[in-house]
Image (spheres, rainbow, N blue to C red):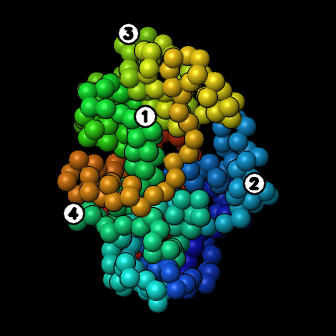
Amino acid sequence: MKAFAARSYGPPEVLQLREVDTPVPKDNEVLIRIHATTVSSGDWRVRSLNVPTGFGIIVRLVFGFTRPRQPILGTELSGVVEAIGKDVTRFNAGDEVFAFSDATMGAHAEFITMPAEGVIAPKPDGLGFDEAAALSFGGVTALQFLQRAKLEQGEKVLVNGASGAVGTAAVQIARHFGAEVTGVCSTGNVELVRSLGADRVIDYTQESVVDCGETFDVVMDTVGTLPFAKAKKLLPPGGRLLQIVGSLPQAIKAPWLSLTSGRKVIGGAAMGRREDLEFLAKLAGSGEYRPVIDRRYPFAEMIEAHRYVDQGHKKGNVVVIVNGEVE
């Protein structure tokens, strides 16, 4: 099969199109023919080692010290089950699915094997393979952090970075939970964020978020520009700051700040769970959640897709069509 593999850490040019063996599913695994995948901010961080302060050594220990231990990046995918192991009962060959491979990655290829009981779900009816591929990274992250915040109906939520993969998902999921949502983005993305259901949109190029004159029950920082020192002005007693992007010193301080400030600081990583994919699939099937796709690239242009994501201005998701035509 064909796959894009990173020969080292670095810019998009470290990726090479290679011919590698098609994986064979173990007894408990499924082999998926990938129709679409994405290039996410997670792929960018792992490939480039451009990570928040203090996490560089941790990323190297997890993913490989001098080069990626798993050279094939990519965590999101959709496709068709090609074959199943002898112990698999949950899926059959021909089933349309979407999946989240998380830290094991491997989705920037024509095929992937995954445990049948892993983070895989049937593709929602009414969604193309491109949209299904973009459901999980932003959706799972937004969902898990909002759940950790114990978001309640009627609460006010600020989403900082509301036009990215996590932000666009967070606006829609928070609305589903009955929250009043304010999104923060640049001028060119205001209408997009409003169309997703945001009650108010702050253009950070025209207005200071911390001086907006409001407080919020939950502040979700998806881009790392609202550390607690700034966000505390936006949080009343009992408010929650969700640090989706933060440095290691911020992560270390979070428990102390939660104990002493009267606000709760919540960080950490989102982990792939099948129940989250099933929740997102149901939400997408009902029309309440639609992944935003900025650009679609053919598989041969994977490096160009990485270059675009590296610029840091994508709207929602960047999808790569592995099997099929780019519409």
Residue identifier under label 3: 213
Labels 2 and 1: the sequence-earlier one: 2
Relative depth, front residue between 72 and 277: 277
Residue identifier under label 1: 149
On residue 17, the disc is none
Q: Residue at x 39, y 72 (%)?
A: 79
* Alpha-carbon span between mark 4 and mark 1: 31 Å
* Alpha-carbon span between mark 3 and mark 1: 22 Å
Crowding around mark 3 (Cα neighbors within 10 Å: few <14, some 14 to 19, many 20+) is few
Q: Residue furthest bottom?
A: 86
Against 153, residue 205 (above or below) is above
Q: Does any portion of residue 40 appear in the rendered image?
A: yes
Crowding around mark 4 (Cα neighbors within 10 Å: few <14, some 14 to 19, many 20+) is few
x, y percent for residue 48: 67, 50
Crowding around mark 1 (Cα neighbors within 10 Å: few <14, some 14 to 19, many 20+) is many
* Alpha-carbon span between mark 3 and mark 4: 41 Å
Residue identifier under label 2: 61
Residue identifier under label 4: 126
x, y percent for residue 240: 46, 26
